[in-house]
Amino acid sequence: MSYQLLVGAHAFLGEAGALAFLWVFVELLKPDEARVKRAKLASAAGVLFLLLSWLAGGYAYTTTYGKQVKPVIKGGPLPWAHEVVMEAKEHAFLFVPFIAFAGAAAIRLGGKRLAWDAGLRFSVLLLSALVVLLVFVIAGMGYTVSTGARAALEAGA
Amino acid sequence: MRDARAVYFATILTILFIAVLTVVAELSAAAKEALKAAFGHHWIGKSVLAIAFFAVVSAAVYYTRTLDSVIRRWGAMKWSMGVALATALSLLSILAYFTLQFLL
């Protein structure tokens, strides 16, 4: 599979995971039995999307990025796009699946309690918002890395 | 303790574990090489160790009474705020480390 396709799949699946947790957030603003059921489904889908994004991005990173893209960025006008942004991104991404899993587990364990336990509901809303925010920050970092590679290619690195 | 709080607790420790492992592997060439030798790539090593750490801590606090007294001190709301705080601190630490490494 080509590097571009893997990176595209990584980004698409990550965004799909974020959208699934945005869906969870909306469902749990005023939860009832049907909304909790939908939130369970959305959170499970979100965790799955994020795990697949982890696999696609990890495969691209460990097989191609280090050998072909990293040296180009480091030789270009924006070396910090790798040295700072990519280095932080590749590690910060690892937080996301665990936070997503914790949110999904809390919905499954909480069940109907989410309708009346304000503390539990707040906790799932906070973790869902955190997943959405982190994914969009990480997507911005990915865009910066791509910009670093593009700038290097344009400069003839 | 069969409660969401046990999973939140394991998540906080796992996020901090990833941040510490990241910085240690950067500071110690031997640690990074050991990860590479064991898993083929240092990042795969960190991923596998993070999953293993989360699984062990989650199972320990969820299926046993280990740390029950600690976890019961806070409600789910406070533990989730702990997850957000651990995430922010870990992200900023990693970002600060690589920024300083680049600048110095």
Image (cartoon, coloured by chain):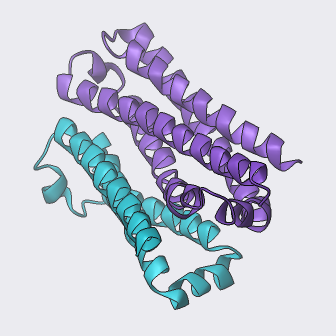
Q: Position of residue A121 (x, y in %)?
A: 27, 24
Q: Colour of chain A?
A: purple
Q: Nearer the viewer, residue A32 or A66?
A: A66
Residue A28 picture quarter: top left
- Quadrant assignment, res B34: bottom right
Towards the viewer: A147 or A4: A147
Point 62% across, 49% down: residue: A145
Provide residue A152's location: percent of width, then percent of height: 71, 54
**Residue at (28% x, 55% y) in the render:** B89
Q: Position of residue B99 (x, y in %)?
A: 41, 64
Compared across the picture, whether A58 is left or right of B25 comes to right
Is A79 displayed left or right of B50 in the figure? Answer: right
When the figure is inspected, residue B47 is found, relative to residue A134, above or below; the finding is below
x and y percent of residue B26 in the render?
48, 78
Q: Can you name the residue that lies furthest to the left here?
A: B73
**Chain whose colour in the figure is cyan:** B
In this image, A85 relative to B64: left or right? right
Picture residue at 17% right of the left edge, 41% below the top: B78
Nearer the observer, B99 or B12: B99
Please state which of residues A118 and A34 is positioned toward the viewer in this rendering: A118
